[in-house]
């Protein structure tokens, strides 16, 4: 019992939708007056039917979530966008308070919600290390002590006295992560920082996190990268519509998440209210996986071609739009990215798409993917202008290897591709 | 929801370092945390100072140009054209004393009143005692004040050599107290406004000209002695009035001030400051949900 470092008890978090506050001073005064007399909020609508995690004008980002974390554990937190992952981290890192319930914490907690927080472009790398360190909760003496280590880790020694506004984005991120990685808190909260930096640096970051856990400190790790979750955590919780859906060993949690969240059915449909307003005028309707015969399936054969189709609607004409897919393995390896206007000729021809309903269809040739589970993501954007919509894990599907090259040997074959290459064997 | 009320009433449990609850108790001000954030406050001061002069050509010279130009303008308009009384003091010094001291108060108030709006990005990412930001502003402004005050002393010396009618006296020893009171008032009002602007944005616009109007009901461009008797009582309600008069009396030797008035200002300052810190702490907990 005494080794618990975090105890989250019945935590809920409600956000009021639409308007900020009740809008007018007089309404606020009414609410305040009622509260002062311990009366219910006169403006709150109650007893409305629920829909997902939206209730009346209240969005429940978290509902009655309870869990505990023991010292030295690395706990993964997974869930789809809007499931409440960020909210729980914000509460834990004290950026916002819970609406009800309570959280108990033992030890210093530090978050890497986003690296580089508080960097000032005019200040030099050295000055920013001190400023950023202090913002993250370090004392000056502590930073002095770790300065060389931070500098080493960041790999920006030569530019340490240059204002960070002259840094490349890679250098900037490395410096920022270096500061955060040397915080040495008892509890570290990490959210998607690994999305930044090159592969080499990402490996370094993951390594650093592993070190942190080995030193007996506790890590909460939120990521969309299932392979990182599997590699770094022993246990994970799955959040779904603000509720705790499952707490299990990492492999089971990942399996559960992939099976429940993303459409197992080979089809992902978007309801109007699921699409963020920022996507406008783009509205996704459906992403489907079709087999050779045009049937919606959740498993395709490695040796047969299949089709990925994205249906969407434009409420206004769009110029330069490209609609594309991300294909990743569930272990997090990126397999490929492809856009419907990849063909330069088509890109030239199809400059503007008028308002209306569209289907972008991608035919994937036979003999491409190895067996295993894959996730499909969607992206709709105008290059260097705007990203309208993105869902990195819209759909998961299986690839069945029956008939694929090398199936005569009953052994797992590493790699995400399983092409049918032409081999020649000569005698000389 | 009844559960909420229940947990709120519980005392902090032993063995845990921190308990996060929906609402803090009214006087749970976490000033201890603030004391731990000394280094952070110093670094914020440094950042503000360095960032300002790195981006300008004249750098810290601006701190001198601004009060000089204001003083000259006031001397011409209020001294020569409107011919307002200066309690028999040299006009230039009279207006300069008012400008230097008022600028400190006004900049403390206006800059701290933007605390939440300006730091949305930072506050949304990481927790540190939020009061560190407005408090660091008081110190950054103190640097600017010190530069301007130095200029003021130079002019006092210059006028003293010229045998002008000025009489610096022992009230000078009150200078730190006067600064403290101005910082407290500026901070108190500033954080109240900054807390309210998270909900009512229009208050921001009020601040700018509110401070300007406030200057006209403070004896900055005129001495208290020049106010008609029926308004004399009224102006004493303004907690800034005794501070400005005391400052002027200390360095120049003319002004209308006594300890009762100063005590009133001090009490007022404490009240505003405590109220401000309480409101600020309330807003701080959930501010990120309303932006």
Image: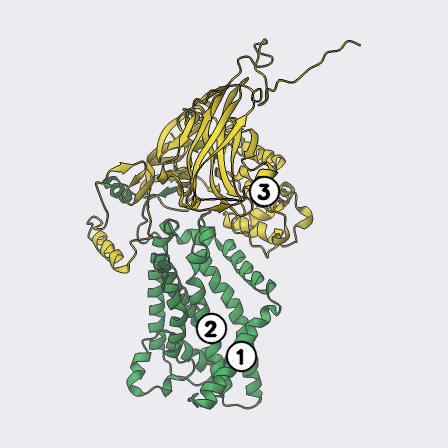
Instruction: Check disc 2 and report its element: helix, strand or loop.
Output: helix
Can marks 3 and 2 be said to lie on one chain?
A: no
Q: Nearer the viewer, mark 1 or mark 3?
A: 3
Can marks 2 and 1 be said to lie on one chain?
A: yes
Residue B289 in the figure: left or right of residue A145: left
> Which colour is chain B painted?
green
Q: Position of residue A244 (x, y in %)?
A: 36, 31
Q: Position of residue B206 (x, y in %)?
A: 37, 68
Instruction: Check disc 3 and report its element: helix, strand or loop.
Output: helix
* For residue B67, above or below residue B184: below
The reply to whether residue A65 is in sight is yes
> Which colour is chain A painted?
yellow
Q: Nearer the viewer, mark 3 or mark 2?
A: 3
Mark 3 belongs to which subunit? A
For label 3, count other residues whose C-alpha is less than 10 Å away and answer few (under 14), some (14-19) or many (20+).
Answer: few
Kindly identify the residue that appears in the image at 42 percent across and 45 percent down: A280
Kindly identify the residue that appears in the image at 55 percent across and 17 percent down: A303
Among the two numbered marks 2 and 1 on one chain, the one whose residue lies closer to the N terminus: 1
What's the CA distance linking mark 3 and mark 2?
Answer: 60 Å
What's the CA distance linking mark 1 and mark 3?
Answer: 60 Å
Q: Position of residue A52 (x, y in %)?
A: 32, 36
Are dots 1 and 3 in contact, CB under 8 Å?
A: no
Q: Quadrant of residue B64?
A: bottom right
Label drawn at residue B69: 1
* For residue B197, above or below residue A314: below
B248 and B93: which is toward the camera: B93
* For residue A1, above or below residue A314: above
For label 2, count other residues whose C-alpha is less than 10 Å away and answer few (under 14), some (14-19) or many (20+).
Answer: some
Instruction: Check disc 1 and report its element: helix, strand or loop.
Output: helix
The reply to whether residue B14 is in sight is no
Residue indicated by mark 2: B103
Residue indicated by mark 3: A348
């Amino acid at each position: 019992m005494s080794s618990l470092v975090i105890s989250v008890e019945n935590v809920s978090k409600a956000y009021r939708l639409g308007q900020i506050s009740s809008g007018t001073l007089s309404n606020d005064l009414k609410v305040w007056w009622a509260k002062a007399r311990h009366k219910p909020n006169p403006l709150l609508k109650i007893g409305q039917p629920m829909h997902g995690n939206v209730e009346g004008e209240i969005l429940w980002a978290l509902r009655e979530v309870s869990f505990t974390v023991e010292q030295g554990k690395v706990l993964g937190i997974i869930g789809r966008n809007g499931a409440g992952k960020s909210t729980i981290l914000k509460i834990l890192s004290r950026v916002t308070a819970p609406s009800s319930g309570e959280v108990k914490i033992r030890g210093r907690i530090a978050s890497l919600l986003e690296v580089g927080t508080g960097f000032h472009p005019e200040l030099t790398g050295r000055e920013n290390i001190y400023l950023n360190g202090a913002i993250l909760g370090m004392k000056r003496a502590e930073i002095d002590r770790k300065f060389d280590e931070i500098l080493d880790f960041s790999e920006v020694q030569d530019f340490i006295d240059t204002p960070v506004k002259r840094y490349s984005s890679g250098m900037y991120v490395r410096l920022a992560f270096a500061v955060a990685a040397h915080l040495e808190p008892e509890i570290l909260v990490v959210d998607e920082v690994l999305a930044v930096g090159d592969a080499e640096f990402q490996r370094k970051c993951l390594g650093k996190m592993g070190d942190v856990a080995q030193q007996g400190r506790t890590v909460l790790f939120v990521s969309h990268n299932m392979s990182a979750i599997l590699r770094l955590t022993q246990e994970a919780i799955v959040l779904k519509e603000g509720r705790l859906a499952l707490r299990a060993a990492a492999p089971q949690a990942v399996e559960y998440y992939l099976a429940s969240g993303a459409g197992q059915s080979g089809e992902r449909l978007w309801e109007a209210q699921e699409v963020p307003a920022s996507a406008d005028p783009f509205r996704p309707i459906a992403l489907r996986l079709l087999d050779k015969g045009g049937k919606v399936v959740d498993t395709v054969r490695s040796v047969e071609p299949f089709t990925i189709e994205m249906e969407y609607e434009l409420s206004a004409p769009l110029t330069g739009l490209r609609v594309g897919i991300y294909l990743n393995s569930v272990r997090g390896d990126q397999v490929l990215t492809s856009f419907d206007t990849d063909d330069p000729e088509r890109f030239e021809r199809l400059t503007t798409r008028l308002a209306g309903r569209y289907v972008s269809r991608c035919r994937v040739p036979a003999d491409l993917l190895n067996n295993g589970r894959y996730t499909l993501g969607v992206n709709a954007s105008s290059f260097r202008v705007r990203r309208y919509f993105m869902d990195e894990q819209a759909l998961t599907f299986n690839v069945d290897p029956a008939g694929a090259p090398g199936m005569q040997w009953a052994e797992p074959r590493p790699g995400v591709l399983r092409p049918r290459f032409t081999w020649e064997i000569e005698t000389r | 929801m009844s559960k909420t009320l229940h947990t709120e009433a519980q005392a902090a449990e032993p063995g845990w370092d921190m308990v996060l609850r929906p609402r803090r108790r009214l006087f749970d001000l976490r000033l201890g945390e603030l004391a731990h954030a000394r280094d952070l406050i110093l670094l914020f001061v440094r950042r503000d100072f360095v960032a300002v002069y790195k981006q300008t050509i004249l750098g810290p010279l601006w701190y001198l140009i601004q009060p000089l130009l204001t003083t000259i303008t006031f001397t011409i308009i209020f001294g020569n054209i409107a011919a307002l009384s200066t309690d028999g003091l040299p006009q230039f010094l009279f207006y300069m004393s008012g400008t230097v001291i008022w600028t400190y108060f006004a900049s403390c108030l206006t800059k701290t009143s933007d605390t939440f709006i300006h730091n949305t990005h930072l506050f949304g990412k990481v927790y540190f005692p939020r009061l560190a930001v407005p408090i660091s502003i008081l110190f950054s402004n103190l640097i600017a004040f010190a530069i301007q005050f130095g200029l003021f002393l130079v002019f006092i010396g210059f006028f003293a050599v010229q045998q002008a009618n000025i009489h610096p006296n022992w009230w000078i020893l009150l200078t730190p107290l006067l600064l403290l009171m101005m910082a407290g008032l500026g901070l108190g009002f500033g954080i109240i406004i900054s807390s309210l602007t998270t909900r009512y944005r229009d208050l921001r616009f009020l601040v700018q000209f509110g401070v300007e109007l406030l200057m006209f009901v403070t004896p900055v461009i005129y001495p208290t002695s020049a106010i008609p008797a029926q308004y004399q009582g009224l102006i004493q309600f303004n907690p800034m009035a005794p501070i400005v008069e005391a400052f002027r009396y200390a360095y120049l030797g003319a002004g209308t001030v006594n300890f009762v008035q100063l005590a009133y200002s001090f009490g007022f300052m404490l009240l505003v400051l405590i109220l401000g810190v309480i409101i600020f702490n309330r807003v701080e907990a959930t501010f990120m949900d309303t932006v």
